[in-house]
Amino acid sequence: MKKLLQINFSFNGPFGEDMSNGLKALAESINQEPGFIWKIWTENEKGKEAGGIYLFEDEASAQSYLEMHTARLKQFGVEEVHTKIFDVNVPLTEINKGSLG
């Protein structure tokens, strides 16, 4: 069953185009993660937050990525990472044009 992973954390930037340019290699590397389907990058410059919404093939893939990424964020100095893993209700998601990969 596909799993949605939500991650957010305090972030002082960069944001916008600078984020896009600075994190391009990271974004490309995420595509290689086992079970990864897609990611929506989130940012809130005013609130000094960033994160993402990810879709994975299964819970094991989502959990494995979560553990690796949380450790990576801590190496970057991010002290507190907020995360949740959700089941995806496929029929309702499809009604609302959600892409499940």
Image (cartoon, helix red, strand yellow):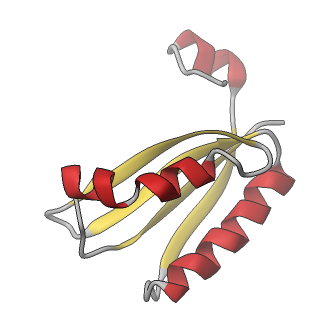
Q: Quadrant of the C terminus?
A: top right
Q: Quadrant of the N terminus?
A: top right
- Residue 9 at x, y percent in the picture: 41, 72
- Residue 28 at x, y percent in the picture: 54, 48
Above or below: residue 78 compared with residue 21: below
Inspect this view and state whether residue 5 appears. Answer: no
- Residue 100 at x, y percent in the picture: 65, 24
- Residue 12 at x, y percent in the picture: 24, 76
Above or below: residue 49 compared with residue 12: above
Residue at figure coordinates x 46%, y 84% from the top left? 76
Q: Nearer the viewer, residue 44 or 89?
A: 44
Residue at figure coordinates x 67%, y 48% from the top left? 86
Q: Is residue 22 left or right of residue 46?
A: right
Inspect this view and state whether residue 22 appears. Answer: yes
Residue at figure coordinates x 69%, y 72% from the top left? 68
Above or below: residue 62 compared with residue 80: above
Q: Please tell me how many numbered marks the rendered image carries.
A: 0
Above or below: residue 84 compared with residue 31: below
Residue at figure coordinates x 61%, y 60% from the top left? 84
